[in-house]
């Protein structure tokens, strides 16, 4: 009777909670992979996919390294070139528009913010899960490097007697060797981007972001950046023929254009999360620059624009805040930071009894 009771109870349990069979495991695999039909890959196909993933991971590593290069170039440009190169012509624009374009397209700030965007983007698509636009954007950086190498190369070979008048520059020109070294570095980076561009289709891609207002803000940021580039190019097209003017125009337009293009193309949650912090940083840096050059009131538009982006991290919608990837990331970041401060550090806080 005892065995009969156990058998009936086990049978009833199996009916109520059946064990997962091969079909259920297959459905779970299909759900994880996002494909409608689970396919068993051969060893050769697995090896090919592994090599393809390696290409995309190599591209991410180059983006990480290039972000440090952009930060270094921002520092070098600010210290040695910013005050020596001629200012771009903005006289044909309204006074308010002149201030907006001048602050947004500041070369040092654009190089710094572009580096932040590139750094964040290098970790936004793990295991080769690039979006379709990233391969083309990655390869386009090689042309930007070639243009920068040409601009710095012309600067290094120019005749120092052809220096513009003191009305356009206020500091002595840096040595020509500086331009030669930077031209060589940019040429190497251009070849690295061209050689590391993935040639195949990503083995997997991320899901498009459902945060409509976040993507709308990013598109607005990109359109604003494109507008600044077009206005600068139209008003200063003649500067390309001048070594100093061409270098100033490259530094003011090319990093801003690439940053705006990448921001415009972001479509997954991780890509949008990578795009917002550099915009916030740029707004803060622009505000600090405006306080120094113009006054506190001039920072209001930049601060309002920064507040709109910071609002993405609020727990909205109130009913389901966890559906907001910005809030989810921010809450996880706060929890990790709190855990880090609570955890004991080796060598600190040891009680006196430990040494007795």
Image (cartoon, rainbow, N blue to C red):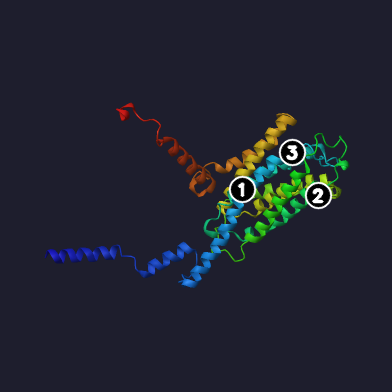
Count of residue discs: 3
Disc number lying in front (1 or 3): 3
Q: What residue is shown at x 86% (from left), y 50% (from top)?
A: 241
Q: What residue is shown at x 41% (from left), y 68% (from top)?
A: 26
Q: What residue is shown at x 69% (from left), y 42% (from top)?
A: 74
User: Going from the N terminus, do you reach mark 2 or mark 3 first?
Assistant: 3
Instruction: Estimate the x, y position of residue 144 in percent, counting from the top left.
Output: 72, 53
Q: What residue is shown at x 69% (from left), y 50% (from top)?
A: 185
Tell me the element at label 2.
helix
Residue that numbered label 1 is attached to: 275
Label 2 close to label 3 by CB (< 8 Å)? no
Q: Is 118 placed above or below 337 here?
A: below
In this image, 284 relative to 21: left or right? Answer: right
Instruction: Estimate the x, y position of residue 285 in percent, counting from the top left.
Output: 67, 37
Residue that numbered label 3 is attached to: 80
Residue 290 visible in the shown view:
yes
Tell me the element at label 3.
helix
Task: Mark 1: give few (<14), some (14-19) or many (20+) Cα within 10 Å.
Answer: many
Q: CA distance from mark 2 to mark 3?
A: 16 Å
């Amino acid at each position: 009777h005892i065995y009969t009771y156990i058998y009936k109870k086990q049978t009833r349990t199996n009916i109520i909670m059946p064990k997962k069979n091969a079909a259920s495991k297959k459905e779970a695999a299909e759900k994880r992979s996002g494909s409608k039909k689970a396919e068993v890959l051969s060893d050769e196909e697995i090896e090919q996919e592994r090599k393809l993933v390696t290409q995309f991971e190599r591209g991410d590593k180059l983006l990480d390294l290039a972000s440090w290069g952009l930060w270094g170039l921002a520092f070098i440009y600010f210290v040695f070139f910013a005050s020596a190169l001629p200012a771009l012509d903005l006289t044909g624009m309204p006074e308010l528009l002149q201030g907006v374009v001048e602050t947004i397209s500041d070369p040092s700030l654009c190089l710094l913010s572009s580096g932040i965007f590139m750094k964040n983007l290098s970790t936004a698509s793990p295991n080769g899960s690039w979006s379709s636009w990233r391969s083309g954007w990655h390869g386009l950086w090689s042309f930007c490097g070639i243009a920068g190498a040409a601009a710095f190369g012309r600067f290094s070979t120019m005749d120092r007697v052809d220096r513009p008048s003191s009305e356009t520059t206020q500091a002595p020109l840096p040595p020509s060797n500086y331009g030669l070294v930077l031209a060589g570095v940019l040429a190497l980076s251009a070849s690295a981007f061209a050689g590391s561009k993935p040639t195949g289709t990503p083995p997997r891609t991320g899901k498009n972001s459902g945060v409509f207002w976040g993507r709308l803000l990013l598109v607005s940021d990109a359109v604003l950046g494109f507008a600044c580039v077009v206005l600068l190019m139209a008003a200063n097209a003649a500067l390309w023929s001048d070594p100093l003017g061409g270098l100033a125009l490259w530094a003011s337009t090319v990093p801003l254009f690439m940053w705006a293009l990448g921001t415009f193309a972001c479509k997954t949650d991780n890509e949008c999360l990578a795009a917002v912090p550099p915009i916030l940083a740029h707004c803060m840096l622009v505000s600090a620059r405006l306080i120094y050059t113009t006054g506190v009131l001039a920072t209001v538009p930049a601060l309002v624009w920064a507040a709109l982006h910071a609002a993405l991290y609020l727990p909205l919608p109130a009913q389901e805040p966890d559906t907001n990837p910005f809030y989810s990331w921010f809450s996880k970041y706060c929890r990790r930071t709190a855990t880090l401060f609570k955890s004991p550090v080796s060598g600190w806080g040891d009680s006196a009894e430990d040494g007795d």
